[in-house]
Amino acid sequence: MDILVESLMSEKALSIDAEKSVRDLAREMTQNKVGSLLVTKQEEYVGIVTEVDIVRKAVSHGMDPKTITVESIMTSPIITIESDQSVIEANNLMEEKHIRHVAVTRDGEIVGILSVRDLLHPVYVS
């Protein structure tokens, strides 16, 4: 029996506006204890931003997190996987794309986030 993405995903797909500062982004991630946020522009998802993006695209280049925008470091387009696909397929997708987070969709609508860390959680099948 395949374990499906929907059984491990986080159902809280949190987001931040593209025009917010990277400092605001870091605060939001800290407050919510998450490693990624979806990025919105005019209430539409336009990208995803992660802790790794903050380090590799902003801090390591000496950029000021108070003045640069989330949009300037986000990854776009968002890589997605359908909720009824197996976690093996999700793992393979993440490995192929060299990413640690994917947005989970149901009928084309984003309903959650799956991270590499989520794949480490034990799943008990009765």
Image (cartoon, rainbow, N blue to C red):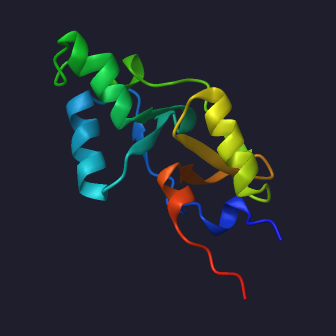
Is 29 situated above or below 125?
Answer: above
Residue 16 x, y percent position in the rendering: 39, 40
**Placement of the N terminus among the 4 image quadrants:** bottom right
In the image, 2 versus 6, the foreground residue is 2
Decide if residue 68 is on the left or right side of residue 91: left
The quadrant holding residue 66 is top left
Decide if residue 13 is on the left or right side of residue 88: left
Work out which residue is located at the far top of the displayed protein and give it. Answer: 61
Q: How many marks?
A: 0
- Can the viewer see residue 57? yes
In the image, what residue occupies the spot 26% across and 29% down? 22
Work out which residue is located at the far bottom of the displayed protein and give it. Answer: 126
Is 83 situated above or below 64?
Answer: below
Decide if residue 18 is on the left or right side of residue 42: left
In the image, what residue occupies the spot 51% across and 32% down? 42
- Can the viewer see residue 82? no
In the image, what residue occupies the spot 62% across and 25% down? 77
In the image, 78 versus 3, the foreground residue is 3
Residue 79 x, y percent position in the rendering: 65, 34
Is 116 situated above or below 46?
Answer: below
Residue 109 x, y percent position in the rendering: 71, 49
**Placement of the C terminus among the 4 image quadrants:** bottom right
Is 122 situated above or below 87?
Answer: below
In the image, what residue occupies the spot 42% across and 43% down? 36
